[in-house]
Amino acid sequence: MGARKDLAKSFSRLTQEKVEAFCLEWVIGLRFKPVAPGCHVSINQCPLGSVALYCRHFEFLNLRHPFSNFVLNILEYYHVLFGQIHPQVLARVLHFEVLCCASRYDPTLLLFRRFFRLAKNGDWFAFETSQVDTCLVSSMVSSLGVWKDRFFWVSDEIVPFKLVWRHPDAVLNEHEPSALEINTRFLNTLRE
């Protein structure tokens, strides 16, 4: 439980030079003004006008900028930020997107909500499998090693809408969409 409640106790060890090198390597434009937060600033102290990004989201998940519309739709709909999502949890979003594209369908928020729901996981948020349909991701890496101490800020211009830090005590009362709301042919394709 302690590891899940340490968001305010996790500090970045990145220097400004390492942040800029990371951004160049992962093609995050320096026009987004990447900044090393300092060794005594936690990720939940992200300054106004900035967005926190974990390096592990890029290294482990191969997240890329510009972010896909699907990933942005998920963040906007659930009012969560990259800094509030564990890399393994974001992996579910990206795996779902790849699965949809491989099945020759556009990933949609409605269909994602049929399989996953937002849940609290200590100070972070998670996407757990819904009670309605079976899990699409059969296995996940169980450990990423150290990841919470490598984050940085970028200008909020990196996303096309206003992001707000969701409070961990926010009420979650989202219901999964019914099968009638979903393209059943697509649903059956994903279950195969």
Image (spheres, rainbow, N blue to C red):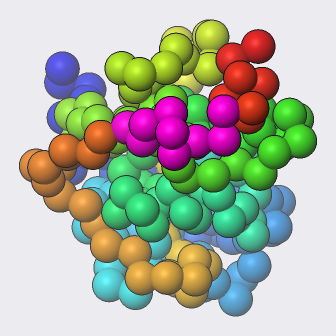
Quarter residue 159 falls in: bottom right
Q: Magenta stretch containing residue 84, yes or no?
A: no
Residue 96 lies, in percent from the top left, at: 67, 36
Q: Is residue 38 visible?
A: no
* Vertical order, 2 against 79 (above or below): above
* Vertical order, 44 against 31 (above or below): above
* Vertical order, 191 against 157 (above or below): above
Question: Between 135 and 155, which is closer to the camera in this rendering?
Answer: 135
Q: Quadrant of the C terminus?
A: top right
Question: Between 36 and 62, which is closer to the camera in this rendering?
Answer: 62
* Left or right: 149, with 31 as reference point: left
* Left or right: 174, with 153 as reference point: left
Q: Is residue 113 visible?
A: yes
Quarter residue 68 falls in: bottom right
Q: Residue at x 24, y 36 (%)?
A: 120
In the image, which residues are magenta?
Answer: 176-184
Q: Residue at x 32, y 79 (%)?
A: 47
Q: Quadrant of the N terminus?
A: top left
Q: Residue at x 75, y 70 (%)?
A: 66
Q: Residue at x 62, y 20 (%)?
A: 136
* Vertical order, 22 against 185 (above or below): below
